[in-house]
Amino acid sequence: MDVKNAFLNETLSEEVYMKPPPGTSSPPHKVCLLRRALYGLKQAPRAWFATFSSTITQLGFTSSPHDTALFTRHTPQGIVLLLLYVDDMIITGNDPQAISDLQHYLSQHFEMKDLGSLNYFLGLEVSRRSDGYLLSQTKYASDLLARSGITDSNTASTSLDPNVHLTPYNGVPLEDVSLYRQLVGSLIYLTVTRPDIAYAVHIVSQFMAAPRTIHFTAVLRILRYIKGTLGHGLQFSSQSSLVLSGYSDADWAGDPTDRRFTTGYCFYLGDSLISWRSKKQSVVSRSSTESEYRALADTTAELLWLRWLLADMGVPQQGTTLLYCDNRSAIQISHNDVSMSVQSTSKMIVTSFVIIS
């Protein structure tokens, strides 16, 4: 569903004045006192969310403390969930009557537009299949290819050339960096449904300030890879279990410039991928054990948030969540099988130990 003119529904609590718009007749040296929010006003988004939140909580919905834009309501027949993004929302659940009541209730308080079944949301395409759902960004990716001008280029089998190591110094500086930044920004959003390009996009996004020709070539290779895999996306099976599991990893001084390590993790709900990340660590680790342990700390933080969010959505996890790591020393430390003294270990590692434990 969509709320028409959402920001015009809020009454402002602050005094805000504006010049009379052109073409209107008003006394000289007079200004207008705004009683309601307008688009472009910095207070408008917050005022709209406060109004919507207050309205929907009167129907018995509760805002999740782990994602305030997620509202849930438990009924005798099941649960209803509403996810809000500015003036767009997704409503789902297993109580059809409660969903219908919610739609009617919202229509009484706001000017609503029912867009029907979920097929498209914020650039994401939702396709129903016999065995579940496919979440993709095919149209978004096609538009990105057209904007980059490589629709007639050959495809690439991988998103990165394994023989090329990007640094800030190789190549010639680009005369116009705007296209590079636009393409990388679009690629970052494309990773919402394309975890297979997450690492490659993570690499090229490090050179946004001063990109060079070799970096632009790497971006074009990612785009050529996308051209050959336009139909890729996230598959959510209707037969999948709802058990959460995670995987954590880190490379070995992978950045050729500063030798910092890269953290990578992913989480599955059953056999459906729901969360992933590729990010350079903020400090230089002195061993693979230290880097793997830092990665475990970041992964554990995401794990806790996912467990809390799933519980809010009516999918509580029973027992502990399996978290896989391929570094024996890091696993032993997390089990407290290795003595760790504050004197011999940095505060960062001790903090990570507390998070994982």
Image (cartoon, rainbow, N blue to C red):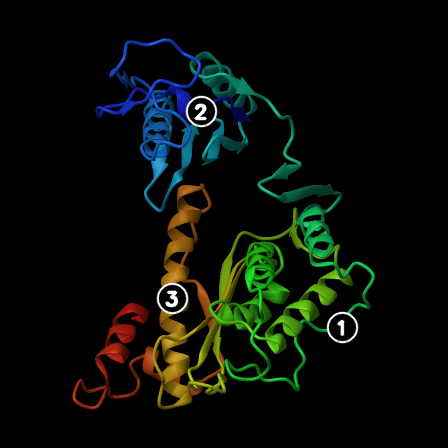
Q: Quadrant of residue 36?
A: top left
| Residue positioned 62% across, 78% down in the render | 214
Residue at 75% x, 54% y is 231
Which of the 4 image quadrants contains residue 40? top left
Q: Residue at x 53, y 69 (%)?
A: 202
Q: Mark number for residue 157?
A: 1
Q: Which mark is residue 14?
A: none
Task: State the residue in front, 27 or 200.
Answer: 27
SS at badge 1: loop
User: Tag 3: residue type?
Assistant: Thr
Residue toward you, 65 or 89: 89
Which amino acid type corresponds to the residue marked 1 in the rendered image?
Ser
Mark 2–mark 1 distance (CA, rounded to whole Å): 45 Å
Q: Tell me the number on the disc at residue 300.
A: 3
Residue at the image position 42 percent from the left and 28 percent from the top: 39
Residue that mark 2 sits on: 6
